[in-house]
Amino acid sequence: MAESFLHGRTAEETPLPGVPLPNREIEIVQLLSGGKSNKEVAAVLGVSTRTVESHRNHIMHKMSFESFSDLVRFAIRNNLIEA
């Protein structure tokens, strides 16, 4: 599923209308809300765990999420993961 967001778009484009998250952040939301740990996401994406944590914090702030549960609900509502 994450692969579909990478093909045919530049890093600046957002795959979801009205959602201010670029492709990489959408990919991180998908992986985290799908049950992967920060370390597992880092391994999948080939980045450091700290990079994943930074993206996660940025997403939480940008979207005004107060908890990780908010992030998971967002992912489900936007069909980024299967419920």
Image (cartoon, rainbow, N blue to C red):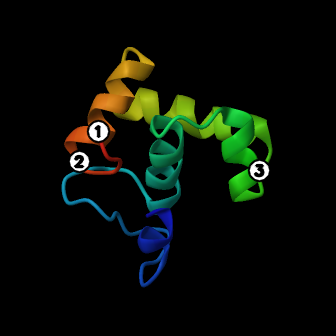
Q: Amino acid at mark 1?
A: Ala
Identify the residue at horizontal 33%, vertical 23% (top origin). Answer: 70
Quarter of the image with the N terminus is: bottom left
Q: Which residue is mark 1?
A: 83
Q: Residues within 10 Å of mark 2 (few under 14, many from 20)?
A: few
Residue in the picture at 37% in, 30% down: 71
Q: Quadrant of residue 77?
A: top left
Q: Secondary structure at mark 2?
A: loop
Of the image marks 2 and 1, the number of the one nearer the N terminus: 2
Q: Nearer the viewer, residue 4 or 50?
A: 4
Mark positioned earlier in the residue sequence (3 or 2): 3
The residue that disc 3 covers is: 43
Mark linked to residue 78: 2
Label 1: state its secondary structure: loop
Q: Residue at x 23, y 47 (%)?
A: 78
Left/right of residue 10 with respect to residue 83 in the rendered view: right
Do we see residue 64 in this rendering?
A: no
